[in-house]
Image: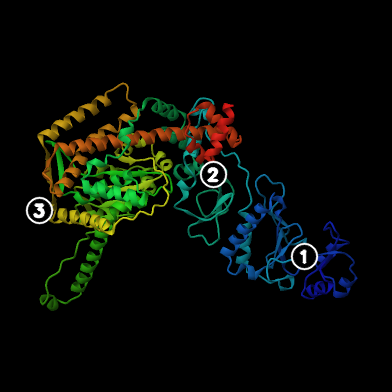
């Protein structure tokens, strides 16, 4: 029971005290005290066990947190800790600015003063709950006075907060308000598919998240139990809306974007609004053309039945490399648990970047190939794609850093020379403006990339930790630009840039090898009919090994091994740069041209004949055939890179005559990449089927979804379904065992 002397103190501070009964109901005409307060004598005469504070009076406002809507103590504590942390992150010294009282049933009252009061408001209601978890008590309301406080401050220390701080409290509180999904205008199913099959928009929603559309406009500021709280880039408020985890839908409070606020928006809604000006019929038609919907499902189902994987060709052919390179990669595998596949592929990129335009290969008169390649190292999060890559490419990063530093040094010297007057320039050696020699790029615009390549003509390697951003540029729904540029560079065709500022740039012989990691689900989204038709996907070499998360190894690599590899790559880089990059009188690179030895040519003719037979076969899956012509180009490229590597080793192989051994090693690489592409496609089909089953049974329990999946295909991918449902693999096996009983 609260001491009456304390109540009198509150009255003297301007608060209005009212009596309430055991059920928290005001006694008497309490509304008279919404605009006036009892004096100390009147408070002395009150005879009750509970008292209340009138809100809306003396500028008092209260955020009422009712945790009884949650079932367990753990749930209540977790929710309160998260809510409090959110407020504290956005309001400096939050706990020092408000008073927080603990209620009798385990809830909380957050009390403060404000001049911008409104009436009692239900602010947030959790999904499936009938009662609000957050309400406010303002004009016309009251709260019970308690004697248990969460903060050091008590009722007599309630003070004003700023309007901005009040807005933040309200804004954050609203993020916990669940909105039921509402029906949004969609095209008619009959326009695209037959009854009970997946629509293009359902297929798109299954394969994309809202972040695929809005990641350049919004940032996640908090990961809550039920949602991701997001903030528009440049916004002043603590959040702009949220993405519900259970539905994957976006809900915005903000009105500062092209997307409507106060509506639930799926990935398909966002795609339509952003790329088709809210024309749902047009967007559905476009997605259908790109391969979304049941027609593509039928097509890929046949892939799983027709495509046969050669397990031997799914192992990276490490033997294609010289023994010392093999030993280094094996040592990384032994001491760092690094993947031979990821490292072996990354070393191909190293060869491509170093060789660049210095040497090309002539398959026959009129047919010359360069060393351009695109490599996507595919794997689930946490398998260590980037560390694996760094084990191999770190010497090039060092060399690249040195080139950048040297350029800056020369540029500084040139700038000083430029500032000299005519007489001073006559007394010193003439200096020319230096050219950029940087040869590795990461996040860079096409304009900057072309300009950089125009100055460093041998090659510009593009390395990205995550390839998703690079791939998204190819998947933008507009003609030309990035896609056409990259298709041209892969084929070593000249590209130009007509700049609005400074100067124009033209690259006659672009060599831009690309390397990066990507998650399988994200890569699968780019296996569209459009990207098949334009040949983009078929140019991508993919590496998707079965990587196991290994325990920590206390095995140590000897420092000499690490240093040896660093020196090896740098010596190779320096040798090509100094001995094999020739330029004409106009400072343009003149590429050496390597020819096939008679033995190598004989092997290539055999390989080409075998690939052509598969292309003409009635048995091979049509979807997979489209990649084979690109392999006819990749095989000579592989042969050239390996031949140059062995020639650098000082073996009997000539730098400019491709040996039979190099061609046979190139064939092994090609078979490896062909089978990896098949593996990824099969995985894509399996995941697509699982997603469709989940979508068709989304109202059922997870256990029932597992049963439905098993009934359709007893051999389904247990690991993938466990990830999609967010359950353990043991749960999958337990359910299957129940079905078998």
Question: Where does residue 643 sit, x and y in percent of width and height?
Answer: 16, 43
Local SS, label 2: loop
The structure residue drawn at horizontal position 31% and vertical position 21%, both measured from the top left corner, is 618
Q: Is residue 326 left or right of residue 739?
A: left
Residue designated by label 3? 584
| The furthest residue to the left | 585
Please say if the residues under marks 2 and 1 sit with CB atoms less than 8 Å apart: no
Label 1 sits on residue: 146
Q: CA distance from mark 3 to mark 2?
A: 58 Å
Can you say whether 703 is above or below 438 in the image? above
Q: Secondary structure at mark 3?
A: loop
Q: Earlier in the sequence, mark 3 or mark 2?
A: 2
In this view, the residue farthest toward the top is 618
Q: Secondary structure at mark 1?
A: loop
Residue situated furthest front in the rendering: 555
Q: Nearer the viewer, residue 351 or 240?
A: 351
Can you give x and y, in whole percent of width and height, for residue 374 in the image?
29, 44
Q: Position of residue 440 (x, y in %)?
A: 27, 55
| Residue at the image position 22 percent from the left and 64 percent from the top | 407
- As drawn, the label of residue 273 is none
Disc 2: which residue: 248
């Amino acid at each position: 029971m609260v001491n009456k002397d304390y109540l009198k103190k509150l009255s003297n501070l301007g608060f209005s005290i009212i009596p309430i009964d055991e059920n928290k109901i005001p006694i008497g005409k309490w509304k008279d005290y919404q605009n006036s307060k009892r004096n100390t004598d009147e408070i002395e005469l009150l005879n009750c066990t509970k008292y209340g504070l009138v809100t809306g009076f003396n500028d008092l406002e209260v955020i009422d947190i009712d945790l009884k809507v949650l079932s367990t103590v753990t749930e209540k504590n977790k929710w309160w800790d998260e809510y409090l942390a959110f407020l504290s992150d956005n309001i400096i010294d939050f706990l020092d600015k408000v008073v927080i009282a603990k209620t009798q049933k385990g809830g909380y009252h957050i009390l403060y003063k404000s001049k911008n009061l409104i009436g009692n408001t239900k602010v947030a209601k959790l999904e499936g709950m009938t009662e609000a978890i957050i309400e406010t008590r303002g004009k016309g309301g009251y709260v019970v006075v308690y004697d248990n406080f969460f903060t050091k401050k008590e009722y007599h220390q309630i003070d004003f907060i700023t309007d901005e701080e009040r807005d933040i409290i309200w804004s954050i509180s609203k993020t916990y308000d669940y909105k039921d999904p509402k029906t949004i205008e969609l095209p008619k199913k009959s326009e695209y598919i037959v009854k009970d099959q997946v629509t293009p928009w359902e297929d798109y929603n299954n394969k994309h998240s809202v972040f695929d559309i809005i990641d350049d406009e919004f940032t996640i500021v908090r990961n809550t139990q039920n949602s991701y709280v997001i903030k528009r880039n440049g916004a002043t408020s603590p959040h702009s809306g949220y993405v519900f985890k259970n539905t994957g839908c976006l809900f915005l409070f903000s009105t500062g974007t092209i997307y409507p606020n106060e509506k639930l928006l799926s990935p398909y809604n966002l795609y339509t609004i952003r790329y088709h000006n809210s024309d749902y019929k047009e967007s559905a038609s476009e997605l259908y053309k790109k391969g979304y919907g049941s027609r593509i499902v039928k097509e890929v189902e046949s892939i799983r039945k027709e495509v046969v994987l050669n397990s031997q060709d799914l192992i990276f052919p490490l033997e294609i490399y010289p023994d010392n390179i093999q030993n280094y990669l094996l040592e990384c595998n032994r001491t760092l648990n690094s993947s031979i596949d990821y490292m072996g592929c990354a070393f191909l990129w190293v060869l491509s970047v170093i060789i660049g335009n210095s040497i090309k290969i002539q398959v026959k008169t009129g047919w010359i190939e360069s060393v351009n390649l695109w490599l996507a190292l595919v794997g689930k999060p946490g398998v260590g794609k980037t560390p694996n890559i760094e084990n191999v490419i770190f010497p090039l990063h060092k060399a690249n850093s040195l080139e950048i530093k040297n350029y800056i040094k020369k540029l500084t010297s040139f700038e000083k020379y430029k500032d000299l007057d005519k007489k001073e320039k006559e007394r010193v050696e003439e200096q020319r403006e230096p050219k950029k020699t940087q040869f590795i790029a990461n996040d860079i615009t096409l304009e900057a990339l072309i300009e950089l390549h125009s100055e460093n003509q041998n090659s510009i390697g593009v390395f990205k930790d995550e390839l998703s951003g690079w791939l998204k540029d190819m998947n933008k729904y507009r003609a030309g630009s990035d896609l056409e540029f990259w298709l041209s560079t892969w084929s070593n065709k000249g590209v130009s840039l007509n700049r609005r500022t400074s100067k124009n740039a033209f690259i006659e012989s672009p060599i831009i090898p690309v390397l990066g990691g990507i998650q399988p689900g994200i890569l699968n989204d780019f296996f569209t009919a459009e990207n098949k038709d334009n040949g983009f996907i078929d140019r991508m070499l993919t590496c998707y090994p079965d990587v196991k998360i290994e325990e920590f190894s206390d095995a140590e690599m000897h420092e000499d091994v690490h240093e040896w590899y660093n020196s090896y790559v740098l010596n190779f880089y320096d040798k090509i740069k100094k001995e094999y990059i020739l330029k004409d009188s106009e400072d343009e690179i003149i590429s050496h041209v390597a020819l096939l030895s008679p033995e190598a040519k004989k092997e290539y003719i055999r390989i080409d004949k075998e690939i052509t037979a598969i292309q003409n076969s009635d048995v091979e899956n049509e979807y997979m055939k489209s990649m084979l012509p690109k392999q006819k180009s990749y095989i000579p490229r592989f042969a050239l890179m390996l031949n140059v590597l062995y020639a650098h080793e000082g073996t009997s192989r000539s730098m400019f005559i491709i040996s039979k051994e190099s061609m046979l090693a190139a064939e092994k690489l090609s078979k490896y990449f062909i089978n990896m592409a098949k593996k990824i496609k099969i995985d894509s089909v399996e995941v697509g089927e699982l997603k469709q089953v989940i979508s068709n049974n989304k109202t059922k329990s997870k256990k029932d979804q597992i049963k439905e999946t098993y009934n359709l295909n007893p051999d389904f991918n247990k690991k993938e379904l466990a990830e999609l449902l967010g359950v353990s693999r043991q749960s999958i096996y337990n359910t299957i065992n129940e079905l078998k009983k």
